[in-house]
Image (cartoon, rainbow, N blue to C red):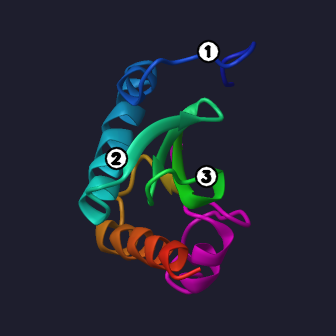
Amino acid sequence: MGKRGPMPDFETIDDYIANQPEETQVVLQELRDIIKEAAPDAVEVLNYKVPSFTLVPGGKRDQQIMMAGYAKFVGFYPFPTTMQKFSDELKGYKQGKGSVQFPLNKALPKDLIIRMVRFRREEILNS
């Protein structure tokens, strides 16, 4: 069962990651590195108390992608249009309208995540 009570406030993404279980920390850091590889200029912020990455300068909430740590998976929130675009490639993962769960016990699909981040960034820039 998960932690009870309100989610703590973190000062930085490093803070957020450091307060996760060890296995979750490793996967979150790997996901963070992949996002930064795909979008080196992304600005790291905390939004809704979770790590977020602004893909364009001054990007609002819908111009960010987010990630969050859980006991058995990390959540990746690239936006509903990105999820639609890559739906066939994400069939092996539990999904929501704008999110996907990557289990901690499986390797992250690095190339897919890079393509998803780049797709979302281009989508924002061209809108």
Q: State how far apart marks 2 and 1 are (Cα).
A: 20 Å
Which residue is the site of mark 3? 60
Label 1 SS = loop
Which residue is the site of mark 2? 32
10 Å crowding of disc 1: few (<14), some (14-19), many (20+) = few
Horizontal and vertical percent for residue 85? 57, 85
Which residue is the site of mark 1? 8
The boundaries of the magenta stretch are 73-99
Q: State how far apart marks 3 and 1 are (Cα).
A: 23 Å
N-terminal label among 3 and 2: 2
The amino acid on which the numbered mark 3 sits, given as a three-letter code, is Lys
- Horizontally, residue 11 falls left or right of residue 95, namely left
Front disc: 3 or 1 = 3
Front disc: 3 or 2 = 3
In-front residue for pair 5/13: 13
User: Which quarter of the figure is the N terminus placed in?
Assistant: top right
Label 2 SS = helix
Horizontal and vertical percent for residue 57? 44, 55
The residue sitting at 29% across, 57% down in the picture is: 34
Q: State how far apart marks 3 and 2 are (Cα).
A: 19 Å
User: Which quarter of the figure is the C terminus placed in?
Assistant: bottom right
In-front residue for pair 35/127: 127
The amino acid on which the numbered mark 2 sits, given as a three-letter code, is Arg
The residue sitting at 61% across, 74% down in the picture is: 83
Residue 76 is one of the magenta-drawn residues: yes
Asked whether residue 75 appears in the rendered view, the answer is no
Horizontal and vertical percent for residue 89? 49, 82
Q: Quadrant of residue 70?
A: top right
